Every structure is written in structure tokens, then in C-alpha cells.
Amino acid sequence: MKVSLVIPAYNVGHTIGRTLEACLRQDVGPHEVEIVVVDDGSTDDTAEQVQRYPVKYVRQQNAGAAIARNTGVSAATGEIIAFIDSDCEPTGDTLLCITEALEREPDGCIVGGIYAPAQDSPLIEAAINEEIRYRHVRAPEEVQHIGSFCMAMRQEHLREIGAFNRRYERSEDLDLSYRAADKGYRLRTLQGACFIHHHPRTVTSWLKDQYHKARGRVENTLRFSKMLKSDGYTDHRDWASLLLAMLAAMAIPLIWLPRVRWIALGSLGLSALLQVPLAAFAVRDTGDWRQVVLIPLQLLRGFAWAAGAVVGLGTGGKDLLRERLAAQRKPEDADAAADTL
């Protein structure tokens, strides 16, 4: 069986070499592997770095990661398509684990991997890594959301599910996952498929990313309401943190009032308590006590989530209403057409 690794790349000259070297070191047994790198209009030395390796290089005008992945699929020839981010490094027998899992699941399955512990990373980068790893190691095997940093399926199934949608910036993997789950596909997290993921982010860029993810998650949850309870990635801590952040945000403008002040402080205090198990996990996982920084980081993220959720409710609700009105008009249009025959 042939496996195509599709890697979207935009201005990643500083990381793409490590990613490609890690992919080329992977042992996939008797399977053939091709690597397809889609340069999404990079302006740095990404092209020069990629062309040093025996991979298929495709360049497009800058259109975003979703379109780059779709372009990569068009160029891929493997029966299995695996999407990997350009700042990820598969470890151990990750690709073999993915391939064998899909060979055992011929009837429709998407599989994904997990993050490795943060190593030799700046504090904020390590904290972001540990927050996501905490979700991965606690997730059930069967989920409804697979991250695009490692997402793999048979090409025939991807054609049935449909391409990545660029409308959902930063959450196109969530959209595809929900569509797949809605069609009855199984989504599995493989604990044996482990990736080192480099997150060269500032707090500001991370919060901006979280805003977009929250907006996309709310919009998609409105479309697929059965995912509201949990999709295996989000849990009660996330929803509680979101609600508490909204409550605090509404109280802060009137914080000079004593009762309102206690509401704001109480909301932030409860939200901080919810983050203690996460921080404790990160400290144990890395051996670095500074990972307690996750508590204030998560409080800040709550406000980014709240802003994204409010906007997502507005845009998603409007789109949902438009779709339902269009669905109601179709029978009327059909009746009108029949009357003219």
C-alpha cells in the first residue's frame, strides 16, 4: 500500500528541514511512501529547503492551509493520505502505526496522533504543547475531532467526506472531522503515533489563534448539534471556562460595584481552580515547575474563547438560519415549477 504524506508549508524554512528528515527516517515496513510538500506562496527560503530532499514539491499562490492540503491531495497518488504540519516530527514507528491502523479499518476511519512531551522548548511554547498533550492522553480512543497536525485516511474516503473548507480558518480540521462523524466514519486517536510539535508562538499570536478556533468550533457545533456534549477533545473544563470567562467579561465594566466585583473575582477564581489538574500534569510531564504558568494562560484564553464564541454564535446562527430558509423555499419552488408544466 502506498502512503502519501501531505505537508502544507508557508514561510517554514526554519522548521521544514527537521520535519522532512524525521519523515524520511520513518520505517513503514513494506509500504511505499511519497511526501508532497505544498508551498503556500512562501516568501522565505522554504522552496530552497524543501528541494534539498527527495520529495514532490508543489507551489501555489497563498491561499491558506486548507487549500494547500487540498492541492496536496490532488498531487498525491497514495491509497492512504496522511496530513502532517510543517513544524511536526513523527517519532518512533508513527507512520507504520497509522498505516497498519487504516489497513485494519477498511470500512471508513480517520486516525490521528498525539503530542510528545515538550522538550528543550521556551516556556510558552512548552506550555501550549502540554495543554494539548493533556487533552490527547486523556481522550478516549474514539473521538469526533482529529487535529490536522496528524490526520490520515484512505483517499477514497476523503473523496466521500469532501475537501477541507477554507471558510473555517484555524478549524478546518474540526469541520472535516464533524462531517466525517456525521457520515458515520469512525475517528480514532492512536497513542502510538507520537509527534514532536514545535510551537514558535507568542502569547498574543496564540490568543489570536484561540479566538479563531473558538469561533470555528461554535459555528460547527451549531451545524452538528450532536457534538455539543463532547467531541473527545473538548470537555466540561472547556465549557465551564468559557462560561466563567463570559461572566467575568460582563462583570468587569461594573467592577467598581462591590457585588459585581465579587462576581468577577469569583468567576476568575473558579476558572483558575479548573486549570490546576492541567498545570499539575504539565509539571509532572516536563519536570518543570514553571508550567504553573498554564493557569494564567488559560484564564487569558477564556476571554479569547468568549470573544470567538460570541462572534461564532452570530455568524453561525445567521448561516444556519439562511440554510433553513433555503431548505423551506425548495419545496415551494418545486410546487411552483410543477404548476407551470
Image: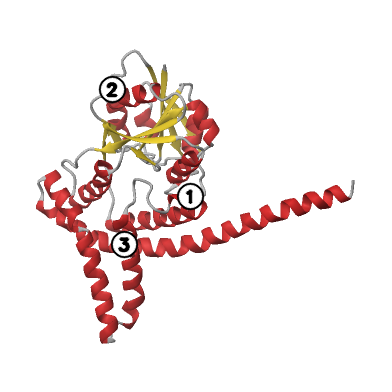
Tell me whether circle 2 and circle 3 mark residues in contact (CB < 8 Å): no
Mark 1 secondary-structure assignment: loop
- Where is mark 2, residue-wise? 26
Mark 2 secondary-structure assignment: loop
Locate residue 74, reporting x and y percent. 52, 29
Q: Is residue 61 left or right of residue 148?
A: right
Query: Visible in this render: residue 176?
Result: yes
- Where is mark 1, residue-wise? 168
Locate residue 87, reporting x and y percent. 31, 38
Mark 3 secondary-structure assignment: helix
Q: Work out how far the residue at label 1 is from the one at label 3, CA to CA, in angstroms.
A: 24 Å
Under mark 2, the amino acid is Gln
Q: Work out how far the residue at label 1 is from the one at label 2, CA to CA, in angstroms.
A: 32 Å
**Which residue sits at x=14%, y=52%?**
280
Under mark 1, the amino acid is Tyr
**Which residue sits at x=44%, y=41%?**
177
Tell me whether circle 1 and circle 2 mark residues in contact (CB < 8 Å): no
Circle nearer the viewer, 1 or 3? 3
The quarter of the picture where the N terminus appears is top left
Quadrant of res 250: bottom left
Total marks placed: 3
**Which residue sits at x=57%, y=57%?**
320
Mark 1 Cα-neighbour bin, 10 Å: few <14, some 14–19, many ≥20 = many
- Where is mark 3, residue-wise? 240
Measured along the vertical axis of the image, is residue 240 above or below residue 113? below
Under mark 3, the amino acid is Ala
Quadrant of res 341: top right
Circle nearer the viewer, 2 or 3? 3
The residue positioned farthest toward the right in the image shown = 341
Mark 2 Cα-neighbour bin, 10 Å: few <14, some 14–19, many ≥20 = some
